[in-house]
Image (cartoon, grey):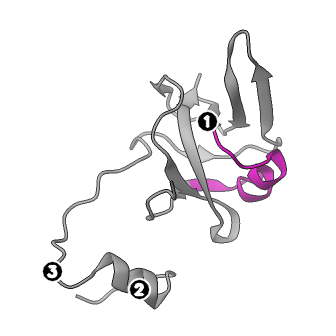
Amino acid sequence: FIFQSMDSIEAINNCFAAGVVMSERRAIIPDNIDLLRDNTPCIFQSNPSNHPDRFKCMLEPTAISSEPGTYNNDLLALRGLNGCVIDVRPVTWAWEGNAFIFQSVESLDVINDCFAAGVLISESGYGAAE
C-alpha cells in the first residue's frame, strides 16, 4: 500500500517490519473528545493530601469525560505543537468538558511549550517510552 507520513523511514520500517500483521489500531483519546487547548497556560497541581501531583490543561468546550478516573495509568504518547511528543498518564480526558488532567515526568515549561494555547493535542502514533 502507499501512504504519506511525517515519520522517518526508520520509524516506518520498525512499525511495518516484515512478518508483522497489520490490524486496526484502537484509539487512545475517546472519539467524542477534542483536546483543543484554550488560551490559558497549563498548570501544575500539587496537593498531596487530596491527590497525586498532576497537570491540568484547559480546553475549548468538548464532551465530558472523567475517564480513566484514576492515577498512575499506562503511559500514552501525545503530540502537540510542531509534532512534539509528550508521554502522559491520563487522569481525566475532559473534566467537566473543559480540562485535560494528566501525570507526566516533564516540567511545566515543557508541557506548556508542547501543549501550547490553541493546539489540538492528538495521538502520536507511537507507543510511550517506558
Horizontal side, residue 121 vs residue 7: left or right? right
Residue type at numbered disc 2? Gln
Residue type at numbered disc 3? Gly
Residue that label 3 marks: 19
In the depicted structure, whether residue 113 falls above or below residue 47: below
Disc 3 or disc 2, which is closer to the eye? 3
Quadrant of residue 83 within the rendered picture = bottom right
Q: How crowded is mark 2: few (under 14 residues within 10 Å), some or many (20 or more)?
A: few
Query: Which residue occupies the foreground of this view, 44 or 122?
Result: 44
Name the spot of residue 20 as percent of width and height, x first.
Answer: 19, 75
Quadrant of residue 57 within the rendered picture = top right
Residue type at numbered disc 1? Phe
Q: Look at 49% across and 56% down and name the residue there.
A: 128
- What residue span does the magenta drawing correspond to? 101-121
Q: Residues within 10 Å of mark 3 (few under 14, many from 20)?
A: few
Q: Look at 74% across and 43% down and name the residue there.
A: 38
Q: Residue furthest front?
A: 130
Residue 60 circle label: none
Name the spot of residue 78 as percent of width and height, x first.
Answer: 55, 55
Disc 3 or disc 1, which is closer to the eye? 3
- Mark 1 → mark 2, Cα distance in angstroms: 31 Å
Residue 102 circle label: 1
Residue that label 2 marks: 4
Q: Do the residues labelled 3 and 2 touch (CB within 8 Å)?
A: no
Name the spot of residue 100 as percent of width and height, x first.
Answer: 62, 35
